[in-house]
Image: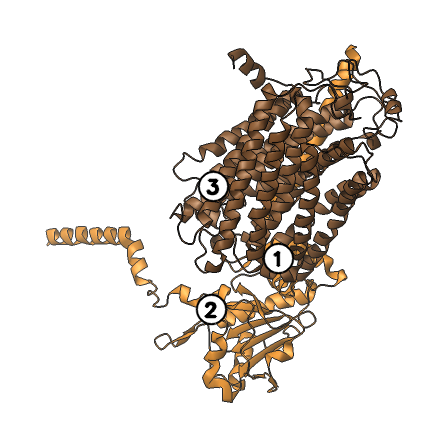
Chain colours: A brown, B orange
Amino acid sequence: MSMQTFKEWFFTTDHKRIGIMYLIGSMTAFVVAGMMALLIRLEQSQLGPTITDNPNEYNQWLYFHGAAMVLAFLIPGLTGFFANYFLPLMIGAQDVAFPRINAFSIWLFYGAIILALLSFVIPDPPDIMWTGYPPYSITTMGNTAYYVFTLHLLGFSSVLGAVNFLVTVIYMRAPGIGWNQLNIFTWTTVAAFVLQLVFIPVLASAVTMLLFDKYLGTNFFNPEAGGDVLLYQNLFWFYSHPAVYVIFLPAVGILFEIFTTMCKNRVFNYKACVYGGIWGIVGISGFVWVHHLYVSGMPDWLRIGQMVTTLLISVPVGLMVMSMWGTLYKAAITFNTGMLYAISCLFLVLSGGLTGIPLALTAITVHLSETSFVHAHFHFIMAMFSAFAMFGGIYYWFPKMFGRYADGKWATTGFILNIVGVHVTFVPLFIIGAQGMPRRYWDYQMFPQFEPYHQVATLGAFMVAAGMSVTILNWIICAFKGKVAPENPWKSCSLEWTHAPNCPQAGNFPNPPTVTADWSPYGYADREANLKATTDPGFPGAAKPAE
Amino acid sequence: MKNVCRIVSVLAVTVVLLLAFQSNAIATQVFRVPDSDIDPEALRISEAKVLGLKPKKGFSFLNQEGETFTFDDYEGKPLVLVLSYYSCDGVCSSVNIELGERLNQLEKDGRLKPGKDFNVVTLSFDKNDTLETLERFRKNVGLDKGVAQGWTFSVVRPEDRERIKVFTDRFDFRFFWSPQDRTFYHPTVYMILSPEMRLARILYAHDIDKSDIELAVLESRNGDFKPGEIINYAVSLCYSYNYKEGRYVFNIPMFVAFGSLFVGISALGTSVFAFKRRQKKREDKA
C-alpha cells in the first residue's frame, strides 16, 4: 500500500471506506478473541493444568475473549461496518449527516483495538472478564484501567456513530421514502442506535466510578469501605442486556435483507415486525436486566416483575421470527452461501431462544445460574446467531463491496465446518451445565465426569476455527481475485442494489434516487412497476439486473 | 542568700516553662484512657453469617407487664430489636434514649409509624435482670412514660436466664463482663427483623436518623408494599445501606448513572440542532 493510499484511507470521510475499516478492525478482534477461545477450550480439555498452570492467565484469556467478541467484534461489526456501508445506500443518501464525526468514530474504535491488543504485552493485563465486577476488579493486580479506557473509547465511538446515523435516517432519506418504506435493516439499526444512545452512558459512568474506586480511593462500589457492590452489577447489566439487542436487532435486519432477496418476496407482516417486533424489543429491553442477577439480593417484586418482562420480550422476538418464516413461505428460494447462513440462523435462534426460557424463570435459574448452560445459551442466541447473520450478510453484499463473488465451494465448506462445529462445541456444554458444571472455572477437579464432554467441545471449537479460517481466507482472496460479479446479481429491489453500482464511489449514486409512495424495497410482486416508481438509476444494468 | 534566691527563681521559671511546653504531653498522660483489652472487631457482628437467620427457638420472655411472649408473636410486622442490659449506666441508656427520640419523631411526622407499621423490643441479655431492674432502668432513662406505641421492654424468663448466651450467639451478638469496669462490653446496634422474623439489617446505634430506621424497616419487608406506599419505596431507592457505617447513605452512583441516561439524548438533540442549522445555511446560500 502506497503512502498516498494509506492517507486516503486514514483520513477518509467516505462512509463506505469507514465501513470497510470497521470490518477489518472487528474481524481482527474476532480472530484474536477466537484464538483466546481456543486456548480456553484447550485448557478445559483435560482435568488439571493443561496448557497453563496459572489460573490468572486463564482469566486474562476469558477477559480478552469476552470483551473483544462483544465490544470489538459484534457491536462494531454490526453497527459499525454494516450500518456504515449499507444504511446510507439503502435510504438513498449520498453520505452521512456528519462525515468527519464518522471518521473520528473509526479512529476511536482503532484506538480501542490497539489498546486492547497492547494488553498482551503489558505486565499485568486485565483479568476481570468483560463484566469488570467489583470487588475483584478494584483489588486485582490486573490493569483495570485498560479495561475502563477501552470501554470509554468504544462507548464514545458508538455514541457518536449512533447520533450520526439517527440524524442521517431522520433527515437524509431520499425524497419520497416514507417510514413504512424503509428496509428492515434500517429499522433494526435505528433501534440499535437508540439503545446505544440511551444505555451506553450508564455503562460509561459505572466503569468510570470503578476506575475512581481502584485508583483514586473512592468507595462507590467497594463493599469493605461501605460501597454498594451490587449496584455496579445492576448498572452494568442495565446497559449490557440491551447491548444484546444492539447485536440481535441488526443481525435480524441482515437476515430480512437476505431472505427477501433470495425468496423474491415481501416482508411478511412488515408493520407488526417493525412496530411490534423491533420497537417492542426496544420498549421492553430496559426492564429485563435483573435476570442476570436473580441469585443476588433483591426484592421479590423486582425479581418476579423482571421474570415476567423477560418472558414477555419473547413476544416481539417471536413476531420478528414469524415474519422471517412467513417471508420464506411458498417462496422460490435461491440457495447460496449467504442464504445457508441465514437459514441456519432460524435454527440457532430457536435453540438459543428456547434454552433462554428456563433461564428466565427464577426458580430454575437458581440451579442453572453461572453454569455452562448459560454459557452455551448466550453463545447460541447472541454470539453464533449474530456472527452467522454477519457472515451471511458479508456473502450477500460481497459483490456490492468488491464487485466480485466469493468462491461458492470454499464458502460452503466453511459454512458446514462452522455449523457442525458450533453444535459439537456447545451442545455438550448445555448437557454438563444442566448437571452443574460451573462456567469460567480454570479447572474442574471436582467434576471429573465432565472431562469427555469438554474434550468433545474442544474438538468442536477447532472445527469452528477451521471453518472460520476457510471463510476469512476466502473473503480476502476473492475480494481481489474472485469472479467478477455483474450489477445487482441477486436481483434485489433495494436501492443499494438497484441505484448504486458495485464498489460505489464517493456520493454513492450516479443519479441520486427519488421514489414514489408505490415503491418498496421489497416490491418483488411487480418488479417492473416497482422500478418505475423510482428515478433512473443512472448506471447501465441496474434497471434490468443481469441474469 | 540573694544568689540562692536567684538560682531558685531561675530554676522555678525553667521548670514552669518546661511544664508549659510539656503540658500537652502531661495532660495526655494524666487523662489517658487506658487501652481497652477488648478488640473492637470482637464487638462487630459478622453480618454475612447472620443475615436471614431467625431468633433461636425455645426461648420466651417477660414484657414490662409481666406477660410471657415469644418472637413468633411478632410475626407479620418488622421488628426493631435492641439488646441491652438494665444495670448499664452508659451506652445502653443512650442507645435506648436515642431510639426513643427517633420513634417519637416517627410517630409525629414519619412515613412509617411505630406500633402500626413495625414493633420495637428492648431485651436484656443480662441473666441478673428482672422486672424490677427493668422498671428502674425505664424510670432512670425517662422511658417509663410517653414512649412510642409498640415498644416493649423485656427480660428473659427465669428458667432461660442461664442459657441466654445461646440466644444472643444466634445473631453473633457477643458480650463480655469486665469485673474491673463492672460493665458489659457489647455491640450497640439496632437489629431489624423482617415480618417473618428473619434478621434483615443491622444499624449501628450512633447518631442514626429516623430515616435510617424507616429505610431499614422498609427494606426488611423485601418489597412487600402497598400501592399507597410507592413514595416510600421511591425514597428508599435513593439510599443504599453502607456496611461499614451500618447506616443508610445517599446513593450517589445511582444518581450519576440515572443522570447519564440523558447524555445520549442530549447529544442527539444537539446534533439535530447542528444539522438543521447547517442545512439552513446551505439552503440560504443556494
Residue A294: mark in rendering? 1
Looking at the picture, do discs 3 and 1 lie on one chain? yes
The image shows residue A323, relative to residue B66, as above or below, that is: above
Report the mark closest to the observer, 3 or 2.
3
Report the Cα–Cα distance between label 1 and label 2.
33 Å
Hey, which residue is sitting farthest bottom in the picture? B159
Report the mark closest to the observer, 1 or 2.
1
Disc 1 and disc 2 in contact, CB within 8 angstroms = no
Numbered marks: total? 3
Report the Cα–Cα distance between label 3 and label 2.
38 Å
Q: Amino acid at mark 2?
A: Pro
| Residue at the spot of label 3 | A144
Q: In the depicted view, which residue is nearer to us: A456 or B87? A: A456
Q: Chain of mark 1?
A: A
Q: Quadrant of residue A260?
A: top right
Looking at the picture, do discs 3 and 2 lie on one chain? no
Report the Cα–Cα distance between label 3 and label 1.
26 Å
> Residue A7: percent from the left, percent from the top?
55, 14
Q: Chain of mark 3?
A: A
> Residue A4: percent from the left, percent from the top?
54, 11
SS assignment at label 1 = loop
Q: Amino acid at mark 1?
A: Tyr
Q: Quadrant of residue A326?
A: top right
